[in-house]
Amino acid sequence: MNETMRKDTDPDYAAAVRCRNGDVDAFEQIVIRHQKKMFNIAYRMTGDYNDAAEVVQDAFVSAYKNIKSFRGGARFSTWLYTIVINLSRNRLKQNKARDIKEPISIDDPVRTSDGEIRQDPPSNDVPVPDRLQSHQVQQRVRGCIKSLEDDFREVVVLRDIQGFSYGEICDMLKLAEGTVKSRLHRAREYLRDCLKKHLGEL
Amino acid sequence: MDCQDIRDKLTAYLEDDLSGPERSQFEMHLQSCPKCSLELEEMKKTIALAQAIEETEPPAWLTQKVMARVREEAAEKKGILQRLFFPLHIKVPIEVFATIAIAVTAFYVFKSVEPEIKPPESITIPSTDIQETVKEEAVMQAQAPAVAPERRPAAAPEPGKKPGEAEGLAPSAGKAEEAADLAEDKAVLRETSGAADMRMKKELRALAPPVMMKAAEAEKATMLLAVYVKDTLHVQEEIEKKVETLKGKIIRSEVSDNKMFFTVKLDSSKVDEFRKALDLLGDVKEEEALPHTEGEVEIGIKVVKTGVRLH
């Protein structure tokens, strides 16, 4: 897509150009517009509220520093989300390296910001649809998503939670569409199995 | 299509990624296979559960914190830019200032050293002036009545030989000749011209070789005068007064009945005026001439009482 078309279709394009010319206030508009989505991507990917807050800050600062490298090849938001995804991935790697240095017992319950999920027994109380909005169900769903492997979690977060199109996901993850599709399929299977395990019958 | 195919294509089906024929095959199988239908339902619910995850509000301070860091970054970026462009825009003036500073310093250094480097020049220039005045004086004296008779007889016979031209040529030709001759015959003139001669001698002595002068200057410029007076009564007072008005200093004074000796320190520019003042007191003879110099000089004054004024 060329730049003229971008101008019309990308609501952030004008602000991005102003940022590129040193307008810090224009960048603030971008931050306000995208911080929630960026935060949620980071939160779902890292599974930790504080990590997510740090990752988002770093992502915005990095975006500001490298704003000149945004050439309008994709939507500005896609470019921003790519940064937050990459930083989230890095944060996960760092956390894993840290966890290896400070090993925890495999018998310990998995500590998440949403609480401990692994030791909860499956519950068959109420049919799932009625419980969709319940806090507890959400907690377990989040726990399952968190338990996915990084590659699978990414696609579920971007496709099912954030609702990005295949094309956008391919741009952000720098993956071929076929890879995204097959990953998404396998990720959903894992997620389904995890949910069945923790929520009982779906 | 068997059950495994259906399982593999669940996502493709839900994402509407199947071609027309595939889709109808898929749906046909589902109708006849409750197990696969259940799998599809489970998958739909799984996606629904994931989609149902509510968005979490980011911390309220996030925007502020991000912008604080961004503004910091912006300021730093400016700093880097300034550092990058300082050499281009500011260094030039700095170099100019440096060059000017060096040039000015060099000029003053050279200026303060110059007199020591080229003393001959500073002395030869005034000395030619003096030679000029000597010549002029010589000419003036030559035209004076006392000298004229000596020269006239030589010039006189010429107009006599050529009566026609005599009146027209005599004044100009004669004068030119006189000027030239007299310049050559300075020695003769000096002997005959009394007081003026004295001054000329002084000035000629002032023309002594520059190297000598330099030495004299380095030690202490001194001059020795002898003043012959009829009466010593007010001489000391007069000298003291004059020295004071000329902002000089009497370093030493010896006074006896008919002889006095003073050593006076004076600025060299005041020497001539001092000399004139002494001339009013009596006859002044220069026993030791003052080198051509600048700055303070010492003048020794010998006051001698005589019955008769010289000359």
Image: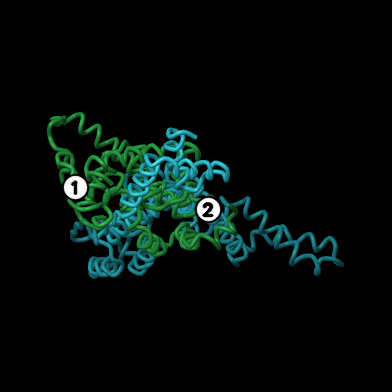
Chain colours: A green, B cyan
Q: Secondary structure at mark 2?
A: loop
The relative height of residue B205 versus residue B141 in the rendered view (above or below) is above
Say what amino acid the circle numbered 1 marks: Asn
Left or right: residue A56 compared with residue B30: left
Residue assigned mark 1: A124
Q: Secondary structure at mark 1?
A: loop
Q: Chain of mark 1?
A: A
**Would you identify the image quadrant in which residue B116 lies?**
top left
For the residue carrying disc 2, how many other residues have a C-alpha within 10 Å: few (<14), some (14-19), or many (20+)? some
User: Residue B310: x percent and y percent?
Assistant: 39, 62
* Residue located 26% across and 47% down the image: A141
The relative height of residue A132 versus residue B35 in the rendered view (above or below) is below
Q: Quadrant of the C terminus of chain B?
A: bottom left
User: Residue B98: x percent and y percent?
Assistant: 44, 50
- Residue A201 or B305: which is nearer the viewer? A201
Q: Chain of mark 2?
A: A
The relative height of residue A14 versus residue A77 in the rendered view (above or below) is below
Q: Disc number at residue A72?
A: 2
Say what amino acid the circle numbered 2 marks: Gly
Marks 2 and 1, how far apart in space? 50 Å
Residue A24 seen in render: yes
Name the residue furthest front: B32
Is the same chain shared between marks 2 and 1? Answer: yes
